[in-house]
Image (spheres, rainbow, N blue to C red):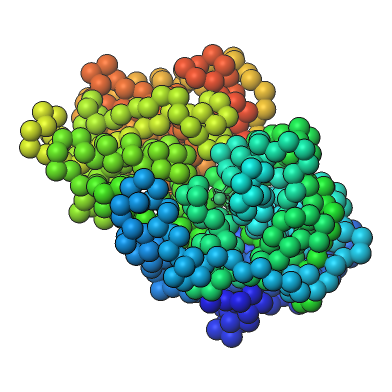
C-alpha cells in the first residue's frame, strides 16, 4: 500500500492529520513531551522540521512522531478498516494445506510465495542508499531523549535486522537502541527475542543493521510477534500485497528493506556488553539498567529526503498502545485458528499488554477455559502474560465493566484462582522477583458447565458503608467500592518508593515496616463486620486518585503493573477473601519473594508539560 514513509506522511498532511513544527524544538525532552501530550488528546501526528541537537545545532533531518497515535491512524498506516483483516487473510492462506499444517502450521505460508509472490525482491540502486554519510555520526541524527532519567538518547522505532548464523534467515525486530556515541549503539534485544537468539549462536562478529523509517507496514511487521518460522519480510509483503524490496548493505552481508529512510550498518562482538538504560518504558516505569550488546557502526546511508520516525513510551495511553491493540486484533484470527476453543482475546493497553489478558473461551466440558488459558500461555509472546482472566464465550472482552462483573459474579476465590509458580516473565516486568521470572495467575471467571462440582458464586455483597468505614482506618487515603464484593483502597505508607524516584537499595527495616503496615490495614478492613462478604480487596498507592475523571484507566495500570502474583496476593484464613497488594514495594530479600530495585514512574517536568499544553492549545 504505502511505498514509503514520506508517502504516508504526505497522506496524513493531506487529511489534516499532521502538525508540522517549523521552529527549532529540543530533542532532549521537548519533542517527546509534545508527542506524548498529542497522544493524550488524540491529536495528529507531528513532524519537527528543525529538531535541535544537544550541542544546540539543528539536525539536517526532520523527525516524525505520533504516526500511529490513534486507532484510525494505525488502520490507515496498515491500509485496513480493521486489523483483523490481516489475520483473516493469513488464516485464509493457511487453510488449504490442512494436513501439513498440523505438523508445521506455517508451512501453509509457502503458498504466499508461489501464489502471491511474497518472497522479498532483491534490488540494487535502492532509495535507502542514495546518500552515504561520509563520517558516520549518530549524534547528528534527530534521536530524542524522552524522559528525565533516561540514560541518553534512544532510537525508539528502529527495525533491527539480524541474520540467523546457521540458516541465513533474516529477522527484523524492533529493539530500542541507545546512542552511546557517534558509532556505538546499545541493542536492547531481550533474551526471548529473535535478535538475542541469533547473537547467542554467533561465533565471531555478528553483522547487524538498524533501519529507520520505510513503509509503515514494514515498521509494523518488525513489532509483530510472528511465529518463529514466518519471516518479517514475508509478512511485510503480505501486509502491502507487494513483494518487499530489499537491498544489500554496503559494509556487511545483510539485506535490508530498500525503502528505509535510513540504514545504520555495523556489527556486534560476542561477549561485549555495556550498561544500557535506564529508559522510561512501556510499563510506565523506567526499565532497570542491564548489560546489553554494543553495535559498532560501519556505515550510515539514507534516502535523498529522509524522515526519522520515533516514538515515546511511558504511562499509558501512549502511541505503542495503539500499535499493540492492532497487533492483538491482527493476530487473533491466527491464534483462534491454532487454538480452537479460543473465542476472543483482549490485551488492554492500560496494563502494558503483558500484564493482563482477557480470554473468552468455549466451555463444553469442565475446565476447558483453563485449558485454553494454558494453551495460550505457550503461544509465542503470550508467554509474557502475568494475569489471564478466562471468561465465557459470550463475554465482551473489551468492556471493563463486564470484566468487573465477571470477577464479581463468577469467581469463587477458593476455587477459581490458579497460580503458576516460576514461569517466564517479560524482561520489562519490574515487579517480577527475578529478571525474566515471575508467577502467573489464571482467574477462571466462567460459569462451570454441567458436571463440574465447583460451587457457583453466592453473592452476598456488602453495604456501601464499608468504603466509608474503611477510609477511617489509619493509613487509608481513599476507598471506593467497585462492585458489591469488591473494594479498592489507596494508601500512603511512610518510606515507600515515591513515583518520581527509583529505590535502588535493599532496606529490610523499612520493607518489613511496609509489609506490616499493609497487613494491618488489610486485617483492619477484614475485621469490620461489614467486610465479611468482601471478596476482593485491592490496595494501591495514593498516586492513583480514585476521584479523578480518568481513575479507571489509571487504576487498571497501577493494579497490574505494581504487583507480583507470588508476593502480593494474600488469602484470608477461610480462603474466601483475597487482598491484592499493588503498592510499590521497597527492595528487600526477606519477604515472601524478593523485591529488586524499584523503578521510578515516567514523569515529565511539570513546567514543560504546562508549556507544551499551552502551546498545543493555541495550535490545535
Ligand atoms: C515501540 C516499541 C519498542 C520496543 N522495544 C523493544 C526492546 O527494546 N526490546 C525488545 O526486546 N522488544 C521491544 N519491543 C517488542 C518487540 O519489537 C516485539 O516483541 C517483536 O515481536 C520482536 O520481534 P522478534 O520476535 O523477531 O524478536 C518493542 C516494541 C515496540 C512497539
Ligand atoms: Mn522474528
Which residue sits furthest left? 450
Count of marks, rendered view:
0
Which quarter of the figure has residue 31?
bottom right
> Which of 374/255 is in front?
255
User: Would you say residue 137 is visible in this rendering?
Assistant: yes
> Which of 357/37 is in front?
357
Rendering coords of residue 356 (x, y %): 40, 43
In the picture, the quarter occupied by the C terminus is bottom right
Side (left or right) of 612 relative to 51: left
Rendering coords of residue 336 (x, y %): 31, 53
Q: Residue at x 64, y 42 (%)?
A: 166
Side (left or right) of 591 relative to 604: left
Q: Is residue 102 above or below residue 265?
A: above
Q: Is residue 272 above or below residue 234?
A: above
Side (left or right) of 573 relative to 499: left
> Which of 309/269 is in front?
269
Q: Is residue 353 above or below residue 580?
A: below
Rendering coords of residue 398 (x, y %): 33, 56
Which quarter of the figure has residue 213?
bottom right
Rendering coords of residue 393 (x, y %): 21, 51
Q: Residue at x 16, y 35 (%)?
A: 366
Q: Residue at x 67, y 54 (%)?
A: 161
Which residue sits furthest right? 135
Side (left or right) of 78 relative to 19: left
User: Would you say residue 483 is visible in this rendering?
Assistant: no
Which quarter of the figure has residue 273?
top right
Q: Is residue 314 above or below residue 495?
A: below
Q: Residue at x 64, y 75 (%)?
A: 4
Amino acid at each position: 500500500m504505502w511505498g514509503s514513509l514520506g508517502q504516508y506522511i504526505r497522506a496524513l498532511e493531506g487529511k489534516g492529520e499532521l502538525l508540522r513544527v517549523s521552529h527549532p524544538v529540543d530533542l532532549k525532552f521537548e519533542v517527546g513531551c509534545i508527542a506524548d501530550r498529542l497522544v493524550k488528546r488524540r491529536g495528529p501526528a507531528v513532524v519537527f522540521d528543525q529538531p535541535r541537537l544537544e550541542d544546540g545545532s539543528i539536525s539536517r533531518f526532520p523527525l516524525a512522531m505520533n504516526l500511529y497515535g490513534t486507532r484510525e491512524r494505525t488502520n490507515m498506516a496498515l491500509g485496513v478498516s480493521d486489523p483483523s483483516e490481516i489475520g483473516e487473510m493469513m488464516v485464509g492462506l493457511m487453510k488449504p494445506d490442512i494436513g501439513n499444517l498440523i505438523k508445521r502450521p506455517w508451512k501453509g505460508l509457502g503458498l504466499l510465495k508461489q501464489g502471491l509472490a511474497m518472497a522479498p525482491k532483491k534490488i540494487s540502486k535502492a532509495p535507502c542508499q542514495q546518500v552515504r554519510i561520509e563520517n558516520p555520526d549518530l549524534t547528528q541524527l534527530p534521536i530524542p531523549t524522552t524522559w528525565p532519567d533516561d540514560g541518553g538518547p534512544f532510537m525508539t522505532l528502529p527495525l533491527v535486522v539480524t541474520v540467523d548464523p546457521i540458516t541465513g534467515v533474516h529477522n527484523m525486530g524492533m529493539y530500542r537502541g541507545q546512542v552511546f556515541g557517534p558509532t556505538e549503539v546499545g541493542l536492547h534485544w531481550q533474551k526471548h527475542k529473535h535478535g538475542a537468539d541469533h547473537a547467542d549462536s554467533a561465533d565471531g562478529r555478528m553483522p547487524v543493521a538498524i533501519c529507520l523509517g520505510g513503509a509503515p507496514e514494514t515498521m509494523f511487521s518488525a513489532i509483530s510477534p510472528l511465529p518463529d518460522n514466518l519471516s518479517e519480510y514475508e509478512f511485510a509483503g503480505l501486509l502491502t500485497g507487494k513483494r518487499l524490496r530489499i537491498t544489500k548493505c554496503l559494509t556487511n552481508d545483510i539485506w535490508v528493506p530498500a525503502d528505509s529512510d535510513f540504514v545504520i550498518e555495523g556489527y556486534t562482538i560476542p561477549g561485549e556488553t555495556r550498561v544500557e538504560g535506564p529508559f522510561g518504558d512501556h510499563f510506565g516505569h523506567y526499565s532497570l539498567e542491564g548489560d546489553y550488546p554494543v553495535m559498532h557502526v560501519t556505515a550510515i546511508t539514507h534516502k535523498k529526503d529522509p524522515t526519522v520516525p520515533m516514538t515515546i513510551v511511558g504511562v499509558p495511553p501512549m502511541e505503542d498502545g495503539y500499535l499493540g491493540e492492532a497487533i492483538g486484533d491482527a493476530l487473533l484470527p491466527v491464534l483462534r485458528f491454532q487454538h480452537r476453543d479460543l473465542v476472543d482475546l483482549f490485551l488492554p493497553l492500560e496494563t502494558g499488554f503483558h500484564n493482563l489478558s482477557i480470554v473468552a473461551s468455549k466451555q463444553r466440558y469442565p475446565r476447558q477455559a483453563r485449558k485454553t488459558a494454558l494453551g495460550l500461555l505457550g503461544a509465542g509472546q503470550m508467554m509474557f502474560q502475568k494475569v489471564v482472566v478466562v471468561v465465557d464465550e459470550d463475554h465482551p472482552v473489551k468492556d471493563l465493566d463486564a470484566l468487573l462483573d465477571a470477577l464479581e459474579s463468577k469467581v469463587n476465590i477458593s476455587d477459581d484462582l490458579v497460580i503458576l509458580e516460576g514461569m517466564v516473565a517479560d524482561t520489562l516486568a519490574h515487579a517480577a522477583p527475578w529478571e525474566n521470572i515471575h508467577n502467573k495467575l489464571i482467574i477462571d471467571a466462567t460459569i462451570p458447565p454441567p458436571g463440574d462440582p465447583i460451587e457457583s458464586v453466592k453473592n452476598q455483597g456488602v453495604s456501601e458503608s464499608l468504603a466509608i468505614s474503611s477510609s477511617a482506618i489509619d493509613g487509608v487515603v481513599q476507598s471506593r467500592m467497585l462492585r458489591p464484593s469488591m473494594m479498592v483502597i489507596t494508601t500512603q505508607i511512610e518510606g515507600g518508593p515515591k513515583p518520581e524516584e527509583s529505590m535502588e537499595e535493599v532496606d529490610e527495616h523499612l520493607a518489613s515496616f511496609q509489609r506490616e503496615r499493609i497487613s494491618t490495614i488489610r486485617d483492619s478492613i477484614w475485621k469490620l463486620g461489614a467486610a465479611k462478604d468482601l471478596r476482593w480487596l485491592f490496595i494501591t498507592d495514593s498516586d492513583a486518585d480514585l476521584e479523578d475523571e480518568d481513575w479507571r484507566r489509571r487504576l487498571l495500570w497501577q493494579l497490574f503493573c505494581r504487583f507480583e502474583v507470588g508476593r502480593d496476593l494474600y488469602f484470608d484464613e477461610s480462603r474466601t477473601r483475597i487482598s491484592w497488594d499493588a503498592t510499590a514495594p521497597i527492595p528487600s530479600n526477606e519477604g515472601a519473594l524478593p523485591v529488586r530495585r524499584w523503578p521510578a514512574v515516567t514523569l515529565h517536568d511539570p513546567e514543560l508539560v504546562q508549556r507544551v499544553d499551552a502551546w498545543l492549545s493555541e495550535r490545535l
